Image (tube, helix red, strand yellow):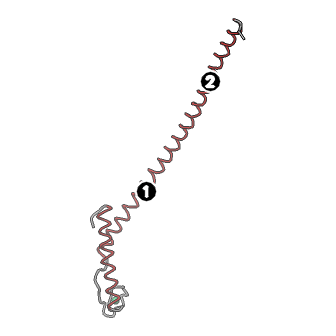
Amino acid sequence: MKLTEQQQKELADVKERLAKVEIVVIDETYLHLFQSLRDDIRTLVAHNDVLIQGIGILTQQRDELLEALKRVLPFMATETTKCHGDECRERWCSSCFAEEDAEIAAERGRAALMAARNTLAKVGGAA
Ligand SMILES: [Zn+2]
């Protein structure tokens, strides 16, 4: 079938219109993607702000814990003691508890002190 000149013009016109429709569809798709991406970025930025705030709080709490640990270290019992009947009831006192139990408590104190010093050396702040 051979198209008339008029039909060829109409066909060309329809093709041109279809091409424009395709461009509009592509534009809308990209616009939707762009808006979606923009929303995702806004969400990420909001989450990032929350994370930064959380890191700040955790850092402050870590510093407070390190400071508390440093203050406690000099008062840790690492040797057995004897209160000679004053009933101090400290776990490392061999007057209040059996010599063996007091020595176990002192040994635990030495191990805890070493662990605390290692932690302070690793995390920050000399003991
Ligand atoms: Zn005692």
Q: Residue 106: x and y, percent?
A: 31, 82
Circle 2 crowding by C-alpha within 10 Å: few under 14, some 14–19, many from 20:
few
What residue is at 60 percent from the left and 31 percent from the top? Answer: 29
Quadrant holding ligand 1? bottom left
Q: Amino acid at mark 1?
A: Ile
Please name whichever residue, 32 or 106, is drawn nearer the observer in this view of the structure: 32
Marker disc for residue 57: 1
What residue is at 35 percent from the left and 64 percent from the top? Answer: 66
Q: Quadrant of residue 64?
A: bottom left
Of labels 2 and 1, earlier in sequence is 2
57 vs 84, left or right, is right
Number of numbered markers: 2
99 vs 47, left or right, is left
Please name whichever residue, 4 or 109, is drawn nearer the observer in this view of the structure: 4
Circle 1 crowding by C-alpha within 10 Å: few under 14, some 14–19, many from 20:
few
Q: Quadrant of residue 81?
A: bottom left
Q: Relative to 82, say whether 51 is above or below.
A: above
Instruction: Please identify the residue farthest to the front as the structure is shown.
Output: 1
Please name whichever residue, 1 or 95, is drawn nearer the observer in this view of the structure: 1
Q: Amino acid at mark 2?
A: Glu
Marker disc for residue 114: none
